[in-house]
């Protein structure tokens, strides 16, 4: 009973986190866009000429930068944004508010700023730039006061003003104001030129929640604490070490983790040899991790059956822990795993079990 209550509370917390993130980080998850009405013909407010303004002016796609937002009104209104992956006119954001992590893909296309994908509990790095999902228009050209469109749930999103003074801990900005109204509540987002989102405010009745830009950290990595498992053959035991691993924007997850795994701490044996390479690594829609290694993993292993069994256990524990699953499918050069001691056929997988592992 206690475990079930804890699980329900954790689920409720995550749902609340995801809801707040959907309000503050540009957009939420919708099934589809309703047909758009006429954009509007009002003259833009402020000194800027709307014909010169482009969405890219208000949504810069940066690498190795972290945006930090200070929240008020709710514990999950504070969050940080790091760009895990970028492509031409497209970015995958990692949004972390301390309660959960969301992956969001935002694209600039044909005069629209679109959210094209969103996934909750995305604690591991995985490239979703080309993933298909629900789309929502966040901004639409012309960037002029009065430009408006309707969302699938009936809410109306409007560019209300082109020049609003917004003061934040990160600085003072002349911002574009976008309001989203409906269902008895209002969300207002402020975008500054060459900066991006600087403030978001959500009002429902007498309740107000806000997230305000507090810092922009440039030329910084995403640092993840990853647990690596290693065998100790003499003791017939598996040990683990938690290490901080840095990822830069567009780093390939499999290569960074493979390089880190080749470094062996004292007191344990290696899992990946010097020439071991990860050909592919991802978590499938079935919840299994798929890991394909090169032939060097086998040819350079030089291990008896007991040592090899421990190495395989360590692989399952390491990659299962990172991807938060207990099933890892291991292949070699795209084919079945086949060594002198073990063979795995199609549909077979390694099972992660960290209960007996000890810290180094």
Image (cartoon, grey):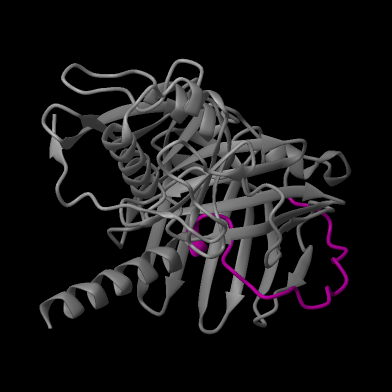
Q: Is residue 41 magenta?
A: yes
Visible residue check, residue 270: yes
Does 350 appear above or below 242?
A: below
State left or right for residue 80 relative to residue 295. left
The quadrant of the image that shows the C terminus is: top left
Which stretch did the figure color magenta?
Answer: 22-45
Which image quadrant is residue 5 in? Answer: bottom left
Percent across and percent down for residue 131 are: 68, 55
Which image quadrant is residue 303 in? Answer: top left
Q: Is residue 305 magenta?
A: no
Percent across and percent down for residue 202 are: 46, 66
> 15 or 283, which is in the foreground?
283
* Dominant SS type (magenta): loop
> 113 or 107, which is in the foreground?
107
Spot the residue most to the front.
Answer: 340
> 343 or 39, which is in the foreground?
343
Identity of the residue drawn at 16% across and 43% down: 357
The quadrant of the image that shows the N terminus is: bottom left
Does 254 appear above or below 91?
A: above
């Amino acid at each position: 009973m206690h475990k079930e209550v804890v699980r329900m509370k954790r689920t409720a917390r995550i749902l609340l986190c995801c809801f707040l993130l959907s309000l503050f980080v540009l957009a939420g998850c919708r099934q589809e866009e309703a047909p758009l009405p006429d954009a509007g013909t009002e003259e833009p407010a402020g000194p800027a000429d709307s014909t010169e303004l482009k969405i890219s002016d208000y949504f810069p796609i940066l690498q190795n930068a972290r945006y930090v937002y200070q929240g008020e009104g709710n514990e999950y209104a504070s969050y940080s944004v790091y760009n895990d992956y970028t492509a031409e006119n497209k970015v995958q954001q990692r949004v972390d508010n301390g309660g959960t992590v969301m992956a969001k893909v935002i694209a600039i296309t044909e005069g629209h700023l679109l959210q094209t994908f969103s996934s909750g509990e995305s604690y591991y790095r995985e490239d979703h730039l080309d993933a298909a999902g629900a789309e929502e228009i966040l901004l639409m050209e012309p960037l002029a006061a009065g430009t408006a469109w309707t969302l699938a749930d009936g809410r109306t999103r409007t560019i209300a003003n082109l020049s609003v003074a917004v003061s934040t801990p990160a600085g003072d900005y002349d911002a574009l104001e976008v309001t989203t109204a409906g269902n008895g509540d209002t969300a207002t987002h402020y975008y500054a030129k060459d900066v991006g989102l600087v403030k978001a405010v959500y009002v429902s009745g007498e309740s107000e929640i806000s997230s305000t830009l507090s810092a922009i950290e440039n030329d910084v990595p995403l640092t993840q604490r990853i647990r690596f498992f290693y065998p100790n053959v003499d003791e017939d035991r598996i040990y683990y070490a938690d290490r901080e691993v840095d990822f830069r924007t567009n780093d390939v997850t499999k290569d960074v983790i493979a390089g880190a795994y080749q470094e062996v701490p004292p007191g344990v044996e290696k899992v990946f040899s010097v020439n071991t390479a990860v050909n592919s690594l991802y978590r499938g829609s079935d919840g299994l991790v798929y890991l394909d290694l090169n032939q060097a993993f086998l040819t350079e292993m030089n291990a008896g059956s007991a040592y090899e069994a421990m190495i395989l256990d360590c692989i399952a524990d390491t990659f299962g822990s990172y991807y938060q699953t207990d099933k890892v499918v291991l292949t070699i050069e795209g084919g079945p795993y086949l060594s002198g001691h073990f063979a795995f056929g199609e549909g077979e997988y390694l099972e992660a079990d960290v209960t007996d592992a000890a810290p180094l």
